[in-house]
Amino acid sequence: MRSYLKVFLIIYIPVAIILGFGWKVSNNVTLQAESAKFHSEMENKAEILKGYHFSESFDPQVHAKLAELSKNTNIRVTVIEKNGTVIDDSYYDLPHIQKMENHSARPEVVEAFEKGSGSSIRRSTTTEEAMNYYAVKYNDNLVLRVSYPMADITAIQAKQLKQNVTTYIFLFITVGMISLYLARRISNPIHQLSLVADRIEAGETKVYFPSFSDKTLTKLVSVIYRIYNSMLQKTKQLEHEKQKLNHIFGILEEGIILLDNKDSVLHFNQRAAQYLAFNLKEGQNIIKQTNDMEALSFLTDILTSTDSKRLQKNLRGRVYEVYMRVFDNEKLVAFFDVTERAEYEQFKTELIGNITHELKTPLAMIMGYSETIMNDPDMDKKFHDKFINIIYSSSNRLNLLINDILKLHRLEMLREDISIEEPTNLAELREEIDAYYNDRPQNITFETNASDVYILREHLMSVVTNLVDNAVKYSTGNNIAVSLEQADGKITLNVEDEGPAIPVEEQQRIFERFYTMDKSKNQNSTGTGLGLSIVKHIVSLYDGKVFVKTNKKNGNTFTVVLEEKEKNQDNV
């Protein structure tokens, strides 16, 4: 595509420049010719008017003829005495003519009396229009002056210019199409040879070699083909035996199946049977060895192709990257379980998109209000303080968001084998929570039937504070109750508020990353949207569960169930 565009530009740009220069020259010549035509027409009109009988006094009959001429042609005819008195004017009646100022100083009149004729282009003080004047000496005492409004001349020139522009646009388009055709004719062989080279470099076994009418290109293609064919033959001889052994015995951790051209199993490893979930038997058609529809669909999609290919397929909730290599009489299929990689890629994509979206808002507010303050050093103190508070709030939100992102990242990287050196003392935890929420307007209570629990202190603290913070932000009630019960190696934590209740359709979504309730439902500002996601990940580390339901106070009760870890459990 680049070579095609380059060739097109090499052809088109010089021609376009020449056409542009030609248009400019021809347009100037056309306009000059149009002006000369008008001037010639005015001279002809003046010569024709010389045949009229003009006297040194106003003649009504002659005036009527001149007025009719102006009506039909828009030309203005003026009869002027040598002393500058206007005797007749085709645009006006006698009373108006008698009031006209003296024309003895008009440049075209002066020139006509001196040289026999004269012309000028200027604004008329009588008509208040730009006029093109031509005056000719009628006799020693009279001058006939012919004039056109410049608006008429400009309109004709504009029409001519439009015609020229239309013509040259057509020429530009025509030249462009011709250039495209030539560029394609020139670049197409280069492009085809480039594709052949790319396919050879990629290791394709079936490469189409184009034919050209040009003898030089035909010889070049022939040389490339011979080299490629020789290389391909030798490569096939080496790979035919090597690839069977390398793919079957070299990749021991992946599922591997070697089939003949009738899809009968020649060799396989146990990992392949494990992935497919049925026992493979050598010498039998692989499709006929199972009645499982998922496995049949999985294998059919792979084996229907007669060419080597690489694809991703799902089987029983897992994602497999499948490689199939087709030899002369055999097919080699290798399975790679890439479920975790696929989930990670999806998670990474979503996380980056969410983080970018969430960071933009506070950053935009910080930058916007900072710029406003910088550009207005004399800003009113009330607005200055207001903007500073907004910047501080946005900075604080940005800090909270970054901290929550880092905390969530550490939790997602942490494995479930957590070592508990010593239990968490709930009395100390309660004191810390009371101190932390001492300045909150709500009444926050904490009750428990246990003294120590084998949950990491920072994890339990994070669960409690995130759930309480959520209640503080979204609840309109005055009371928030926290209760923790210990029984049978599990702890159950309940955080209860007084509403408003979370709609049923949102009760599952609130645990998603960056999901926050509508601001219209929040009496304060929304949080980072990561608090409940952090809770969910901590719960997963302890094989627990978390859910929310509407309580009797028309509020929300968040329930977290965690399994306690064993003391001194080693971390793998």
Image (spheres, grey):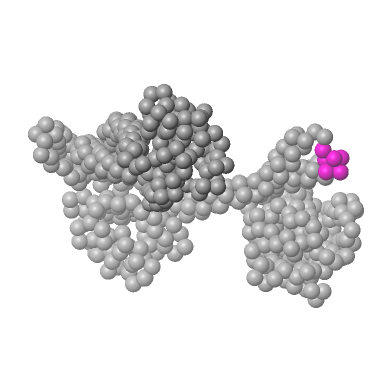
- Residue 99: where, in percent of width, then height? 57, 42
x and y, in percent, of residue 552 in the image: 80, 76
Q: How many marks?
A: 0
Q: Position of residue 344 (x, y in %)?
A: 52, 50
**Quadrant of the drawing holding the N terminus:** top left
Residue 328 in the figure: left or right of residue 272:
left
Check the image and report above or below for 262 versus 362: below
Residue pictured at 86% horizontal, 51% vertical:
436
Residue 319 occupies quadrant: bottom left
Residue nearer the viewer, 276 or 404:
404
Q: Nearer the viewer, residue 474 or 465?
A: 474
Residue drawn at (85%, 66%), measured in percent from left and top? 477
User: Is 282 a magenta residue?
Assistant: no
- Residue range of the region highlighted in magenta in the rendering: 379-384
Q: Residue at x 34, y 38 (%)?
A: 50
x and y percent of residue 219 in the render? 10, 33
Question: Predominant secondary structure in magenta?
Answer: helix
